[in-house]
Image (cartoon, grey):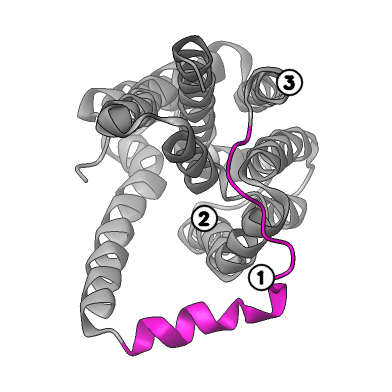
């Protein structure tokens, strides 16, 4: 890959990571507010918030090794396109729901849409010159961090003035546009091995983890860290409403506070 193609690939994949991260943070912090709009009472809100948040990550964790095998079979670019298109469809579905059970079903569908980040990073590492590998990955991860910062602020502004559904629709449109850009400009150079890999081998990934104490320790630390971050993010809107005693402009306040806090430390 020549220098021009490499820079183009890096720019498009990083823009995709920024849009994916920003669109998630445009919506996720405001799900408790959305649940109240769908009819959930304040007494039931904490339970519903926990279920709505966790179901996506549960499905995503189960499907992660499967998507990894699919990536080996059908290519990293295909996985990037699948993930981004599925997330945009989820946002459209979430914007159209009329009750919390429909939102729960949409969040389950969202769990099947993970996999953009590892596939995009694999594309970058296969395309980047050896001397620019660190530069490429650093630039890519910067896009993710900026999405964590800009997403809540932008989502809070849009939700405050036009409603949470408008924020979801906007995120869907942005991701659909990025899907088209990735399809046009990103090239896949990773070898595709269709005769060696089997989808049925996915459970082997878990069996290997249990035999590696270091991996278990890393998984436990990551699990604990993500639990703390998601507990804070999922409950921020409700906490701010309780502190102020009113729910007026709670989306805007939540977005600004989460944006000022910046991305979680890694």
Q: Residue at x 59, y 37 (%)?
A: 189
Q: Are marks 3 and 1 in contact (CB under 8 Å)?
A: no
Q: Earlier in the sequence, mark 3 or mark 2?
A: 2
Mark 2 element type? helix
Between 75 and 29, the one nearer to me in the picture: 75
Q: CA distance from mark 3 to mark 2?
A: 29 Å
182 or 260: nearer the viewer: 182
* Res. 171 image quadrant: top right
Query: Residue 109 at x, y = what percent?
Result: 72, 54
Q: Nearer the viewer, residue 62 or 165?
A: 62
Secondary structure type for disc 3? helix
Query: Is 122 on the left or on the right of 202, as rendered?
Result: left
Task: Label 1: state its secondary structure.
Answer: loop
Q: What segment carries the magenta color?
A: 188-211
Q: Position of residue 212 (x, y in %)?
A: 28, 84
Report which quarter residue 58 is drawn in. bottom right
Mark closer to the chain start, 1 or 2: 2
Residue behind mark 3: 180
Q: How many marks?
A: 3
| Residue 190 located within the stretch drawn in magenta | yes
Within 10 Å of disc 1 (Cα), the crowding (few <14, some 14-19, many 20+) is some
Where is mark 2, residue-wise? 53
Give me the C-alpha separation between circle 3 and circle 1. Answer: 29 Å
Q: Pinpoint residue 2: horizontal percent, then vertical percent.
A: 49, 16
Q: Is residue 6 above or below residue 24?
A: above
Of labels 1 and 2, the one closer to you: 1
Residue at point 38%, 24% (across, down): 143
Residue 197 is tagged as 1
Q: For the residues carrying marks 3 and 2, which lies nearer the camera in this image? A: 3
Cα–Cα span, label 1 and label 2: 32 Å
> Does 35 sit left or right of 95 as displayed?
left
């Amino acid at each position: 890959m020549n220098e021009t193609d490499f820079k183009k690939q890096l720019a498009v994949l990083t823009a995709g990571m920024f849009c994916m991260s920003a669109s998630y943070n445009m919506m996720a912090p405001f799900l408790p507010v959305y649940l109240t709009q769908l009819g959930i009472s304040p007494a039931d809100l904490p339970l519903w918030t926990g279920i709505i948040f966790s179901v996506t990550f549960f499905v995503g964790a189960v499907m992660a090794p499967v998507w990894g095998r699919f990536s080996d079979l059908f290519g990293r670019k295909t996985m990037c396109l699948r993930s981004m298109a599925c997330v945009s469809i989820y946002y459209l579905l979430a914007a159209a729901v009329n009750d919390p059970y429909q939102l729960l079903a949409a969040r389950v569908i969202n769990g099947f849409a993970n996999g953009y980040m590892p596939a995009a990073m694999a594309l970058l590492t296969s395309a980047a010159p050896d001397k620019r590998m660190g530069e490429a990955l650093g630039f890519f991860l910067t896009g993710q961090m900026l999405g964590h910062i800009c997403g809540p602020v932008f989502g809070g502004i849009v939700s405050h003035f036009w409603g949470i559904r408008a924020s979801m629709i906007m995120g869907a449109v942005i991701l659909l546009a990025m899907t088209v850009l990735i399809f046009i400009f990103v090239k896949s150079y990773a070898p595709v091995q269709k005769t060696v890999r089997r989808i049925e081998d996915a459970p082997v990934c878990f069996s290997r983890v249990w035999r590696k104490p270091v991996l278990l320790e890393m998984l436990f630390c990551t699990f604990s860290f993500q639990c703390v971050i998601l507990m804070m993010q999922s409950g921020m809107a409700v906490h701010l409403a309780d502190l102020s005693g009113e729910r007026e402009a709670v989306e805007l306040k939540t977005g600004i506070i989460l944006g000022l806090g910046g991305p979680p430390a890694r």
